[in-house]
Image (cartoon, coloured by chain):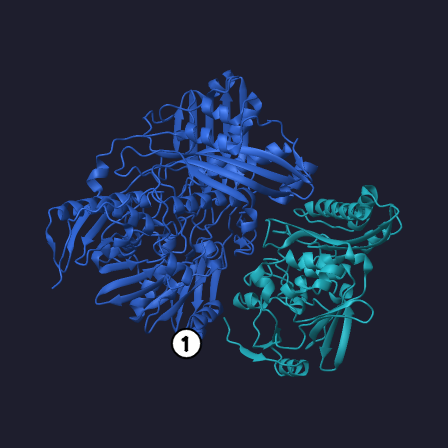
Amino acid sequence: MTTTTTGTPTTPKQSVGTAHTRVDGYEKVTGSARYAGEIPFADLAHGWLAVSTVARGRIRSVDDEPVLRMPGVITVLHHGNAPRLNTEYIGMLGAPPDPTCAVFQHDRVPHLGWPVALVVAETPEQAREAAEALAVHYDREPHDVALSATRTDTHPVDGFMPAVTEKGDLEAELAASDVVLDAEYTTPEEHHSMMEPHAATALWDGGRLEVIDSNQGATWVGSELAKLFSLEPDAVRVRSEHVGGGFGSKGVRAHQVAAVMAATALDRPVRVVMTRRQMFSLTGYRSPTIQRVRLGASADGRLRALEHSAVNLTSTVFDFVEPAAGPARVMYGAEAHHTANRIVRLDVPTPTFMRAPGEAPGSFALESAFDELAEKCGLDPIELRLRNEPDRGPVSGLPFSSRNLRACFDEGARRFGWAGRDPRPGVRRDGRWLLGTGTAAGSFSAGAAPSTAVATAEADGTFTVRIAAADIGTGARTALTLLAADALEVAPDRVKMRIGDSDFGPAWLAGGSMGTRSWGWAVTIAASELKERLALGADIPPEGITVRSDTTEALQALTQKERHSFCAQFAEVAVDVTTGEVRVRRMLGIFAAGRIVNPLTARSQLVGGMTWGISMALHEEAVRDPATGGLYGADLAGYHVATNADVAEIEADWVADPDPDDPVGLKGIGEIGIVGAAAAIANAVWHATGVRHRNLPIRPDRVLQAVTGAPDA
Amino acid sequence: MREFGYHRAYDVAGALALLGADPDARFLGGGTNLVDLMKTGVERPASLVDVRELPLDGIEPTADGGLRIGATVTNSDLAAHPEVRRRYPALTQAVLAGASGQLRNMATVGGNLLQRTRCAYFTDVTQACNKRVPGSGCPAIEGEHHNHAVLGASEHCVAVHPSDMGVALTAFDATVTYETPDGPGRSPLTDFYLPVADTPHQETVLPPGALITGVTLPPAPVAARSRYRKVRERASYAFAIGSVAAALDVRDGVVQDVRLALGAVASRPWRARTAERALAGAPAGAETFAAAADAELAAARPLPHNGYKVTLMRNLIVAVLTELAEEAAR
């Protein structure tokens, strides 16, 4: 028997705050990291989803007989033979399930691309061929997919925040204002478009359901599957070792549910992988928004009135709110302050969380409007924002835990070279390009949710930490390793961080910019307590010494405050108004986002968010064809995201902003990178050309037509 | 995805025989378009005849001072060839403006000419499309058509040809050569693509079973000063929304010779002969260039959402010709 005595004082340097390459980097770049769709199983069968080709109606019949005779086909699941699911529950996020994931429960088709059957075969090729050959007959009904500002059937819905906030007399303050801005902004339907498609393998193992998946939270997906299939929570194990991006779309989806149904029916492992095209209708997206902003200010730029009202669409089966009017409740105060989020139910797939839900589209409208107001007031856009810095929550009246937006602007303006900027639009030229600069502010909520972690001192002197965290490409696995190492006061290479397994105990998901903070809290407590235990000098038995943590009580003790990250975004663009081309020449984002755990991956994540901002400003747009109700070009050839060539000089950095109430000072950086980025670019396009673009994306045809005055955009 | 047979041919006769043996067979070049279409079910060949091993991968000078480019030359090799860069720089620029490095390493000259439109109604088998299913209709005309044709389209199809390379080849009077079981054939590239009319599914003059063996470029001293400019919705890796291949010879301020072709405006690379006629012998300058562009674009019949292309093409033609004229004046 080998035992190791610890307690020898070590003096490792602090790991948090210094750059570390990813602990799983070698596996990822060499391809040895296995993703959900490529882990081998004996006797694996393959399911392929068949989806509706009508946007609204009823399934009259599923003609599965011919398909069942096709080579390799094992079964066809559909609403006529699938097991009933339980959808009467409130899930981990405090909401009932989106019925979109409860597949094959009825004959109604609420949108184009709705799952109508799962064909299971011996090979994925056989399953796909059979699924595409499957004849499904519909009673078609007229559909309505058109979102417009003139619709009268919108209604306020709370979502994850109150739908409506109203303070003061808006019309009176607007009437008393020296300067008034009233403008409408729109953002299009946008899709997550992560690299790795949704993929799940389900199997029964010793009476337990096991799901190998690509998701943003093993606890989350496991608990939802348990409820849907009426299983004991302990009877479901979900593993999600490596995840090739999520951005909000990798929760419970049709593929996991269909795979569990098939694995149960066939009593063998079944894998379901989505195609890119299926992902465009089955995994959520960011709703298009129509936003109206009214600002009233005194001549010195101080706001008297702020109104931000936003409309988004949702499906007919689930109310999802894209709360674009939310950011105004954090960013700016005014005597009269009105915000409202409204939805309209259409025959479309259910939208969902997508990187900075609410803040991404909302900041485009609000921060564009501020740029327009600055122009009207004859004020520098940064100065206008600083004059309207609130000292308490503009709506809540609560104090801010910390608010370092001013520091972001100071540092950003200095590094970007903002001082002395000529505010006049359309006067700088470099050959065929008109040049301009723009800025915008942003915020994203900072929070933490209950999580548990398990820290073990191994007999060989190493440490193993287990937590059901998800590394969706963020570098969370590495960040948690560094946090554990510091709490244990050891070098990071002595810590093995195991994540992505619901058997490690309940933990929050990679979402809401709360992943690393929530998990980091639990890891820090478990590791600190383990360190204290070891300090007593006991021998470590072969099974190691294990300490568990649960942050539920610590989080409940937090006082109510306005808790947010902030940022200042800067962009320089070049615009050729004769071709409509817009190029972002450089971007700078300065962030106040808590203590930064790993500067290397944090910078990547923030630059990634800013790159999303470039994409949002210039490229991304899913076009829905009103005739069919489906998308035009639902693939990555038709849906454009920024390429390397679209991203020139881009830099992200941060100011000191440790959160006073977090054990390590963390906030969260998953989403703040995109917030304000599109507005900074649109404001720069105005500065370059003198033309205000209030509709995203700023496509070449829109730039051309804005110049020629042609009506079509 | 349907199972399919795979055969590799090592000589042209063998390739023709393999294809002839199966009415549902297709030639496979780089596969950068065909394989995608097979995955989505647009193409469902029973077998593929891989022609990449055919001895058609050379680029050689012709006796009269032109170039002969083999059908299986990859886009990368074509763009990098010193004689192409020297004699037809716009061709190199056009090829490099297309796709990505990885795709250009795979894609072939013959395949490039035969690639299909990226109209998303064509590539989505759940939609109607006269090109894919004759007689089923054209949803683009009433639907999404921001990047559809403004020249030479019909009420049956408004799709555009996606090639960049083809635009430069069209400007330089390339001729396509091919083999059939009945013997060789050739077609000027300007006649290679059939008018859309009511048969958008019939795209080229190639007889059934024919194999493109190469492309011949005639000598064109004017092409030594040539340019390709492409506008697209992002800086790289997107199909054109408008492009121009142009060559210009100006002496004493007068246009001596000119070649002009437009991309992403029609079902084929569009040779702008009307503009060329307006330019020949005229004084080189923005006014002449704009008048020539307007003369060419007078035939444009934009749809409700692609009228910007007329403005774009006019501006592009003027910009590229102006650049070339300024270069000549230096």
> What residue is shown at x 15% (from left), y 44% (from top)?
A532
Q: Residues within 10 Å of mark 1 (few under 14, many from 20)?
A: some
Q: Is residue A697 placed above or below A4 in the rendered structure?
A: above
Side of B314 relative to A477 (left or right): right
Task: Identify the colour of chain A in the image.
Answer: blue
Q: Position of residue B189 (x, y in %)?
A: 76, 65
**How far across and down, in percent of the image, does residue B116 sit?**
63, 64
Q: Secondary structure at mark 1?
A: loop
Q: Position of B52 compared to B217: left or right?
A: left
Residue identified by numbered label 1 = A72
* Residue occupying the point 59% across, 65% down: B105
Q: Amino acid at mark 1?
A: Gly
A372 on left or right of B69:
left
Vertical placement of A608 versus B41: above or below?
above
* Residue A151 visible somewhere in the drawing: no
Q: Nearer the viewer, residue A453 or A207?
A: A453
Along the viewing direction, whichever of A426 and B155 lies nearer the viewer: A426
Q: Position of residue A145 (x, y in %)?
A: 51, 47
Which residue is found at the position 69% from the left and 68% from the top?
A: B202
Count of numbered circles on the image? 1
Could you tell me residue B104's position as x and y percent?
A: 60, 63
Q: Quadrant of residue A539?
A: bottom left
Residue visible at 52% across and 33% down in the picture: A416
Observer able to see residue A623: yes
The chain ID associated with circle 1 is: A
Q: Give the colour in which the image draws chain B.
A: cyan
Looking at the image, residue A523 sits to the left or right of residue A678; the answer is left
